[in-house]
Amino acid sequence: MILTSLDIDVEALEARTGWSMKPEGACKGDVCVVLAEGVVTGGRVDVPRLAERLRMPLLRDEAHGLWALGPESGGRALSTAKAPDLVLPDRHGRPFALSSLRGRKVLLVAWASW
Amino acid sequence: MWQALSTELRPQGLEIVTVALDIDPDAAYRYIDKAAPDHPSLIDSAHVVDELLGVVNVPNAVWIDEEGVLVRPAEPASPGRNKALDSLLSIDTSTLPPHLADTLLEARKIKLDHESYVVAVRDWVANGAASRYALPPDEVVRRSQPRPLDVSTAAAAFELGQELHRRGHASDAVAWFREAHRLQPDNWTYKRQAWSLVDPLQGPTDAYEGHWAKDIKAIGAENYYPPLDLSPAARD
């Protein structure tokens, strides 16, 4: 997740990473990790502290004033079998939510032009 | 490519969704416009799917059931043999420049199980959770790609690279792409995407030590895709 600040909105974090901030801690699917006090305050997340707790790498590009928060590490690419709530643009730039296909089976194929 | 299978299985409840992992969406649009699919055809210019699902090569697919639960993790996927690709691979290499001939000779050795994958998809569509190919949640997680810290860091490095490239800082992006390649050398999406931004044919360049023919020879082209594991879930 690309960041320009280390204090980010909980909804933006959830939309990109799938981690939601709940009273019981940081949750993704059926997995929850207890957080220390102050990691989440007033709908904002202290990114370095969350990153340390979830073992997420946090890289800095000084020249461009950017950070990148990587995914949680130490396990598998999937920490849960719940499909991520992906929203991606179609050919015409219209957002398409994978969740709009609930009730049907979905075969999601990644391909590329290269 | 997936249109025929989509047309066949949509009446039975399957929706095929394709996602193009392309930093430059125009490159994907050219293929999409030619194929004119009637299934959702999406663009992931930030390679979010690589990270969220553990995609390390293309084509890779996951299966998602009616409740939004993954029943197969990312794995090599094929809708059947691709006649256009077969025709490209059968070009007489003696007519090509050496680098292209080299690339084509390696590409011919790549193994992808076209037939078994489609058999499995049809079985799942017909039988749902009772299909031997539909895996329980813990098995899906277990069979997804491992994610040690280096792999997570590679994802962050690649994301910085693609962000800088899209912002018009192509030369600054290279260092981050190189770092992603160093940290996760078996991630072909990170390599091929970055190489293709410098040379569409992914040949040798000054920007990267690796290139397609060199790196695939290093692992053996037959290992480019891991064998498709269609075994049922392990029982306790």
Image (cartoon, coloured by chain):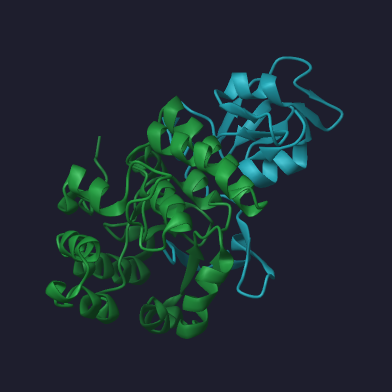
Chain colours: A cyan, B green
Q: Quadrant of residue B108?
A: bottom left
Q: Residue at x 59, y 40 (%)?
A: B160
Q: In which quarter of the image is residue B187?
A: top left
Expressed as whole percent of the image width and height from the top left, the position of residue A27 reads 63, 33
Q: In this view, does B49 lie above or below A95?
A: above
Residue sitting farthest toward the top: A36
Q: Nearer the viewer, residue A82 or B171?
A: B171
Expressed as whole percent of the image width and height from the top left, the position of residue B75 reads 33, 53
Quadrant that contains the N terminus of chain A: top right
Q: Nearer the viewer, residue A79 or A90?
A: A90
Q: Residue at x 22, y 68 (%)?
A: B97
Expressed as whole percent of the image width and height from the top left, the position of residue A108 reads 46, 62
Q: In this view, does B103 lie above or below B12?
A: above
The reply, left or right, for residue A96 in relation to residue B232 is right
Q: Which of B109 and B146 is in front in this view?
A: B109
Q: Is residue B101 above or below residue B205?
A: below
